[in-house]
Image (spheres, rainbow, N blue to C red):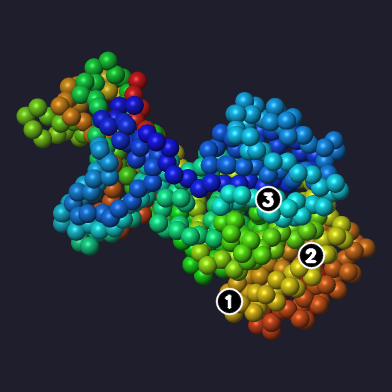
Amino acid sequence: MNLAHPAAFSAFRELLSHGAIMGNRTPLCDGLTLHADPALQLGGEWRSPSGRVLELALRPRAAGAWLGLHLALDLPDLAGLRFLGLAARAVAPDEVLIRACLRSGLPEGGFRDHFMPRHWLAHDEAATHHDLIHLPSQNALPVQAPWRELVLFLPCRPLDLHLHDLAILSA
Amino acid sequence: MTAPASLALSVVIPCHNDAGTLAPLLAALARLGPVVEVIVIDDASSPPLHGADLLAAAGPEARAMAPGWLRLLRQPRPLGAGAARNLGLTLVTAPHVIFLDADDMVMPDLAHLARDLAQDPTARSFDFCIFQHHDTRGDQERLWGQRPFDDRLWRQAGLAHGALNAVGADQAAALVQTANYPWNKIYRTAFLRGKGIGCTPLMVHNDVELHWRSFLLADRIIASDRIGVVHVVRHHGNRLTNRHTAERLRLFPVLDALAEEIALSDRPALAQAFNSFVWGLTDWIGAHLPPEDRPALRAHATRFWLTRTPPAQRRALRADRGALLDRLGIG
């Protein structure tokens, strides 16, 4: 597991917790945060059932440009790795298109995003999704980075998404 | 990390000559976590079940459970699963109970559900929680989960997704039409005892009464999309499900009593759902009954039509299920 806070994520996944969506930044557990464009005036609720990751009910009150679930990774150095990706299981009553991305912090500040090659459509049947980046063929991906995240970009509209499981894959 | 709070579950299992499937179920229940006692009612198996043999066959985890974890009682003659479940319920000491068949298999999500129910304020003081299951009839089609008929009703109720959802009255009127299984619900033991809810002591259809009276009398129902149990369906063999004899007609007095009780409850959606259920069940019984027993079925059905089916429901049935009525010789 290449999570920055594996124990916190594991406890979050195993224990029931819930709360309200709090505007542009909702911390869910150490290393897992929902970030939203403040313009969205995002409201809603979240719940993490026992043994599952997250049930999100997101209710923006206005239009906005971005909305993402950020999972901190412990991957400062990708040297020696050939593949990096995710495996997940999700369901959504109404279809939700998710774009998964590896975000690498830059030493001079800012970040660079590398999107996973596949689109991920959560739909009305619980389904497994997996996707991988082939690292040696990504010349613009920083091999060393001060920090990294997996970002799951979500549509900026009202949505319900149940993320039953999520794992980071590397080889 | 300390173990999260969980419901304490008692499991009641009727068993008639099913020791072979019971052993892996006991092993899984021992591994599951929240199961504090298992009450097996041996419904006159031949040879009789022995607790020590069952635990030995179930493996080290079951043998390591606390003394008294497995309680075994025997009915000297076969009375069916309903009578066995009722006897088991009288012995339950845990605050919550689940009825399983001896050839069911529990899934890890049942333990997660027990934790959610213990911890989530949504579930406070629930009377029963209905959860989803996998039916082995889907295996050949590589389908995981419930049969399409039940799945459609969960979706109709808007409850197809979510680890815990409170069930409103309209949603209950949809969910109550799912197959009348006893093993897809976690019950609050005091709810069943306090309301006098149990199974019908018949060899077949024992679970209709448990299912409908639970929905009728519950103040608080929870639904979960978790697949907690795998239910094995065998189309052949000596299973009671495959017994198609006139004893199925003994259900009709039970249906009469249920119709009466539901009518008195002033819950028209539930009453309509029950009436519709009775006609579907009657049609199913008729399709499997030997020809010599069909006149008796028709007599029961005619009486139910005349005494328990309101005019508006008759019109709806004629319009929507005319072929069913024709098959039964009704209307």
- Residue position for label 2: B251
Q: Is residue B168 left or right of residue B48?
A: left
* Residue B19 x/y as whole percent: 75, 35
* Residue A148 x/y as whole percent: 21, 31
Q: Amino acid at mark 2?
A: Leu
Same chain shared by disc 2 and disc 1: yes
Asked if B307 appears above or below A73 in the picture, the reply is below
Of callouts 2 and 1, which one flags the residue occurring earlier in the amino acid sequence?
2
- Secondary structure at badge 3 equals helix
* Residue B324 x/y as whole percent: 75, 69
Asked if A138 appears above or below B27 in the picture, the reply is above
Give the number of the disc on residue A48: none
Residue drawn at the location 19% of the way across and 59% of the way down: A41
Asked if A99 appears above or below B256 in the picture, the reply is above
Question: Mark 2 or mark 3, which is nearer to you?
Answer: 3
Residue reaching furthest to the left: A108
Q: Is residue B124 visible?
A: yes
Name the chain letter of the residue that bears numbered label 2: B
Give the number of the disc on residue B267: 1
Residue reaching furthest to the top: A80
In contact (CB < 8 Å): disc 2 and disc 1: no
Q: Which image quadrant: the N terminus of chain B?
A: top left
- Packing grade of label 2 (10 A; few <14, some 14-19, many >=20) is many
Residue drawn at the location 63% of the way across and 46% of the way down: B11
Of callouts 2 and 3, which one flags the residue occurring earlier in the amino acid sequence?
3
Q: Amino acid at mark 1?
A: Arg
- Residue position for label 3: B91
Residue drawn at the location 62% of the way across and 25% of the way down: B60
* Residue B25 x/y as whole percent: 65, 37
- Secondary structure at badge 1 equals loop
